[in-house]
Amino acid sequence: MSPMQSIKTGKLSAAAFSLVEVMVATAIFGLVTAGTFGVYIMCQKLWRATTLSTDTSRLANLAIERMIYGLGTNSGLRSAATISIDTNVHTYMTYSNYWDSPNGSPPPANHWSLNLSPTWTERDGSWRIICSNAFDGVTWIDYVKKQRSIVMWPTIWQPDSRQYIANWVLDAEVSTNWQGSDIAVMVVVWKKDGNFVVSNEASALIKMRNK
């Protein structure tokens, strides 16, 4: 037998994939990957929106709580003997748009941009609550519209004593009945994270304890 006659013809392995099978498998893998990535993006958006909603709700309710009960040893509206509301004020000027970022940093509470100036013609929605009681004397609670902040002055005319009640406050309203025994307060906290914008409102009707 010659060498040429001893060569046998080989056969294709049964385990090999045809080109069509490889293309189908690649297409399926691509679809699964794209679907998984789409679900991931959707979950990320849902998480960001939920986080913003939870945060704004918490901040709005915390602002109401601090206005009612006070900050630290400084009493709030609930314990006031008398209050008055001054809307003839306005913000001097905007210092920074910290609210453009969900983790923005407002200026320190004693910063000049949180001072209110008296006015009778240029009201911008800011207001001041003047609280008085036998224990803490007179305190101020200011809503500084252009800085989107609410601050408390435990010692009036001394900015270094000022403390934040809330930031990211898009709107806030306060009113009282003619007897001065009921105080209605409303706060709207607004935050933005990229294309997501969320606001939450909290309100309360306060019966003054010492009235």
Image (tube, grey):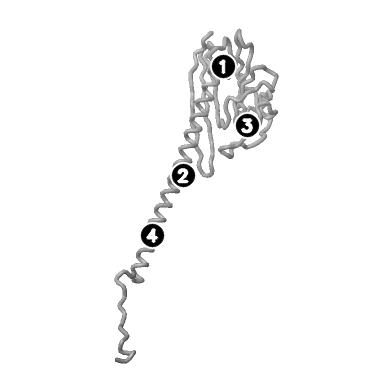
Q: Where residue 47 sits: x, y (%)?
A: 45, 41
Which amino acid, mark 4? Phe
For residue 207, side relative to residue 121 (left or right): left
Q: Name the residue under label 4.
A: 29
Q: Mark 3 points at which residue?
A: 147
Q: Which mark is residue 17?
A: none
Mark 3 or 2 closer to N-term? 2
User: Neighbour class for label 1 at 10 Å: few (<14), some, many (≥20)?
Assistant: many
For discs 3 and 4, the disc positioned in front in the rendered view: 4
Q: Where residue 39 sits: x, y (%)?
A: 41, 49
Which amino acid, mark 3? Gln
For discs 3 and 2, the disc positioned in front in the rendered view: 2
State the separation of the CA atoms marked 4 and 2. 24 Å
Q: Mark 1 points at which residue?
A: 76
Mark 3 or 1 closer to N-term? 1
Mark 1 or 4 closer to N-term? 4
Asked whether the residues under the numbered discs 3 and 1 touch, taking CB atoms below 8 Å apart as contact, a structural biologist would say no
State the separation of the CA atoms marked 1 and 2. 38 Å
Q: Can you say which quadrant of the picture contains the N terminus?
A: bottom left
Mark 3 or 4 closer to N-term? 4
Q: Where residue 88 sits: x, y (%)?
A: 64, 22
Mark 1 or 2 closer to N-term? 2
Which amino acid, mark 2? Lys
Q: Which of 109 and 126 is in front in this view?
A: 109
Q: Residue at x 53, y 31 (%)?
A: 189
Q: Residue at x 53, y 41 (%)?
A: 193
